Image: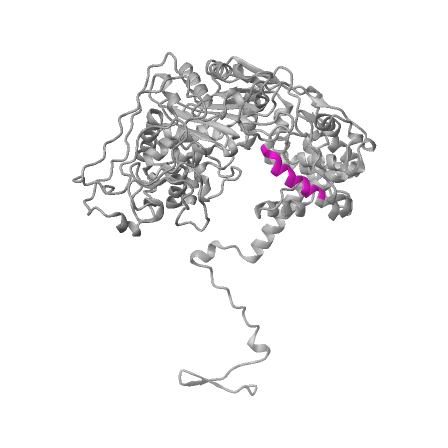
Amino acid sequence: MTDGTPPTRLGGRLRLRRSGPAAGPARPRRRPPRTGWRRWIPTWRWTLGLSLGGLLLAIGAVVICYMLVNVPDANALATAQSNVYLYEDGSVLARTGELNRQNVDISQIPKTTQEAVLAAEDRGFFHEPAVNPMAMLRAGLRMATGGATQSGSTITQQYVKNAYLGQEQTLSRKAKELIIAVKLGREQSKQSILEGYLNTSYLGRGAYGIQAAARAYYGKDASQLTTAEGAYLATLLNAPSALDVGADPGARPRALARWNYVLDGMVKEGWLSPEERAGMAFPEPIAPKPASGLSGQRGYLVEAANQYLISHHVLTSQELARGGYRITTTIDPKREDDFVKAVDQNVNSKLSPKNEADRNVRVGGASIDPATGNVVALYGGIDYAKQYVNNATRHDFTPGSTFKPLVLASALDNRSRTQSGRLITPETVYNGNSETPVEGSSVPYAPKNEDDVDYGPITVRTATDKSVNSVYAQMAVDVGPGKVKETAVAAGIPADTPEFSATPSLALGVMGANVIDMAQAYATLADHGTHTPYTLVTSVDRSGHEVKLPSRDPERAVSRQAADTVTSVLRGTVANGTARAAQGIGREAAAKTGTAELDRAALFAGYTPHLATVVSIMGQDPDSGQLRSLYGALGQKRVNGGGTPGQVWAAYTEAALKGTAPAAFDLEPMPAPAPTPSNTPTPSATSTTPRHERTPATTPPPATHTPPPPTTPPPTTPPATTPTPTPTPSPTSTSPFDGRPGWPPDRGGNDRGGDHG
């Protein structure tokens, strides 16, 4: 029997379909098993379960940590230990660690100073939680996009780090900081936390807290701070050592930018009126007072070692201030004494209290072992107790023409060509006339040679001997200023050096590279183009635990042939050019002189196979701090790099290498390009040659200004006999430069030459 359900056909036969209760329930379809790579992917049920389980475990871990981590007693800053600094031989250089701290009630701190600190570090402090993840994210994004630096931690977190923990950069310390900050935010009032923060923060000059900082920077109590002064102290919270304009004049641009950021923040938050803000001038702090026991060179050496550790992120200024570290430096005590004696004999002994210009004289120097990168000696000034600013590390003076060898190194390493396509070598001829406009640059530039001398056609080698500005400005354009900067950075000049722009003027050393930077670059040339990053510290330990120092693996900066060719050219500068003072050491040397803009500094930079040293004599007003020209100083009408700086360099280098066998340079210079036969062009046929590569006159020889006689006496060391000038080639010569008016150039030396850089 059927129930009226229509039949179905199956295989050509009719079958009756049953329906109703007799048919039974339909079986569910079974999901086929996963195969291949799909079986390794968890299902959504597993994913949801694992996520919920992980979340519960995380919440449980946070709860357990919150219960187990108690707010500890504030660490006792009064028990801070001394740091011990050692020479490279293990003898004691200095001990530091005197604590400067005095707590004050928040009622004694001006309201504007409190608001300045909030504007600098945590503008939402009073209405945001103790830990603010969004603030940390905003700070990270601002710094990543090049905006003003702002702490990602709240003031509560910073107070916890200052008073309860330490400055260690570890995950466990950060986790404790977050938990203690949350607890502290529940247990203490905002006013109490702000007071603790203001009393425990480190602001440089050994000062902990706002009261000690007010005394250290302005010689007054915190209660007497003006709005502008309070804003500057708030500025220092970001980086005390890097923003102290009294200790480092080169820090002024960064300090002013941060100070303006703080004041603008106060206006934005309604804590300061725009009118008050507009009328504020930067409040100059008083001169720093060096700690006892750091007189002479010791203070400069300690400050330089600390600066190295901080800038290379080994230790923070707060950690160094807390003390307990044993720091072994690279300084050789014997060579350090040699440097001091060389400066005393050639500079300090010649300063006269009756000569107003002598008041402005400052000396800085650094000496590096090219093979290791170790700074073996450093001269920071006459006495750390008298002149606090370290002349070896400051960035407000320029290296002048001592930068030119790096331009040549870049040209040789990149196998650069002139505007007419000729390969640049030491024998390439350029137009050496003063104020010759550079060609091939979108930036107009036509530098003067020293004393406005016109040299006419001149080889690169002779232009280096005489330090001809017009030649090196054009060479920088031929190479490309960007490539020149790349070479200099590879050799050791920091990329963030002030005023280090990729423009034609960089050939004349207009950037703020200090003497350590320049000594490092010359050490790279001495080591055949291999750059070993310099160091002032060989080891740091605390309570027997070694602190890791940055890696300093040697790297190839320029090819050996390029570096050795530069060395061969600079040996000629010692023999025939402005660097003749180096002849007095009795061994092979390569060197270059330089003069900063407006004659504010004169430098001598040179090296032997085993020692690279830079000496700079600088001019600075001791009262105003303004940079001054050196005219009339040391009894000289004008101080040149080849004069007194060269005498200091020679006296130091001779003493530092005494007892060691004289070493010769092992050079593998680039081979001279093969001469190519060509028809001798007539003067009128040279119109296709770019102006900077040809003689501007059409009648040989070109008229030039006569170089004036030297205005300063030559170095005390008598120069070697000048080689006989190269005779004029015969008409049958195959040199590609034959037939040029004025060729070959005069190879005779000029003691002052074009040293003005």
Left or right of 638? Residue 681 is left
Q: Is residue 372 above or below residue 269?
A: above
341, 149: nearer the viewer: 341
Query: Number of numbered discs present?
Result: 0
Name the residue at 69% across, 27% down.
286
The residue at the far left in this view is 732
Q: Nearer the viewer, residue 342 or 346?
A: 346
Residue 267 in the image: state x and y as whole percent.
74, 46
Q: Of 192 and 218, which appears nearest the observer?
A: 218
Asked whether the viewer can see residue 579, the reply is: yes
Q: Position of residue 669 (x, y in %)?
A: 28, 32
Which corner quadrant of the image does residue 728 belong to?
Answer: top left
Residue 65 place in picture, x, y as percent: 68, 37
Instruction: Look at 61% across and 38% down and name the residue there.
Output: 254
Image check: 491 left or right of 356? left
Q: How is the image coloured?
A: one colour
Q: Is residue 255 magenta?
A: yes
In this orientation, does residue 533 appear? no
Which quarter shows the N terminus? bottom right
Say whether residue 644 is left or right of residue 664: right
Look at the image and say whether residue 356 sits in the magenta stretch. Answer: no
Query: Which residues lie in the magenta part?
Result: 250-263
Q: Nearer the viewer, residue 608 or 22?
A: 608
Indicate the position of residue 274 as horizontal and vertical percent values.
Answer: 76, 47
Prevailing secondary structure of the magenta residues = helix
For residue 58, above or below residue 644:
below
